[in-house]
Image (spheres, rainbow, N blue to C red):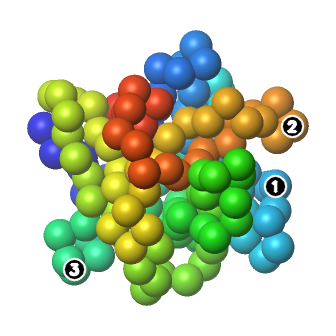
Amino acid sequence: MPIPMFPAQVMLHSDQHNGQFLFVSNDMEGPDKVVEAHAAPGEFRNKFEPQSDGNGGIRLYNPATGFYVFVSNDDAQGDKVVEAHPYRDESRNSFLVLEPQPGVFTFLNPSTNRFLFLSNDQRGGDYVVEAHPYDELRNRFTAI
């Protein structure tokens, strides 16, 4: 089952850390917002609109903030911090959606060759979403 596309809104859930939902936080890295995960399923910032990038991939748009998820250049012990910004047409916003098992998705950014994953790093009690070049269990998300 492919991930639903725009105008559908999805929540991305990870089983890591007893179940977490991705969201665009209010924590900042310069002018960009940090993408994090928390256990609260009903939060308006948890919803994303997958939009076609025109090249076979998607952009993850967060309607609560008007921002797009991207793999930043900010380093986190060898991994890259995943952030959100208002710029639509940037290669770091595009993700190839892979389905390693039915209903489970990984998001690979082709411009950085890195997968989104739920890290162990925290900010204000929430887990930071980062990107690394490894395909592993922490990269896997379900779309709700």
Q: Tell me the residue that label 2 is attached to.
A: 124
Q: Residue 79 placed where, x, y %?
A: 60, 52
Relative to 30, 35 lies left or right: left
Relative to 34, 132 lies left or right: left
Q: Secondary structure at mark 3?
A: loop
Q: Secondary structure at mark 1?
A: strand
Give the residue drawn at x 46%, y 73%: 92
Could you tell me how far apart the alpha carbons at marks 3 and 1 are, in whole angstroms?
30 Å
Give the residue drawn at x 79%, y 55%: 26
Is residue 16 visible to the viewer in this orientation of the structure? yes
Relative to 54, 123 lies left or right: right
Disc number placed over residue 14 in the picture, else none: none
Q: Residue 135 placed where, x, y %?
A: 35, 39
* Quarter of the figure with the C terminus: top left
Q: Along the polypeptide, which appears first: circle 3 or circle 1? A: 1
Q: Are marks 1 and 2 in contact (CB under 8 Å)?
A: yes
Q: Along the polypeptide, which appears first: circle 1 or circle 2? A: 1
Q: Along the polypeptide, which appears first: circle 3 or circle 2? A: 3
**Label 2: few (<14), some (14–19) or many (≥20) C-alpha neighbours in 10 Å:** few
Relative to 99, 51 lies left or right: right
Q: Amino acid at mark 1?
A: Asp
Disc number placed over residue 27 in the picture, else none: 1
**Label 3: few (<14), some (14–19) or many (≥20) C-alpha neighbours in 10 Å:** few
Could you tell me how far apart the alpha carbons at marks 3 and 2 are, in whole angstroms?
36 Å
Q: Tell me the residue that label 3 is attached to.
A: 54
* Quarter of the figure with the N terminus: top left
Q: Amino acid at mark 2?
A: Gly
Q: Are marks 3 and 2 in contact (CB under 8 Å)?
A: no
Q: Residue 58 placed where, x, y %?
A: 31, 65
**52 or 119, nearer to the observer:** 119
Q: Are marks 3 and 1 in contact (CB under 8 Å)?
A: no
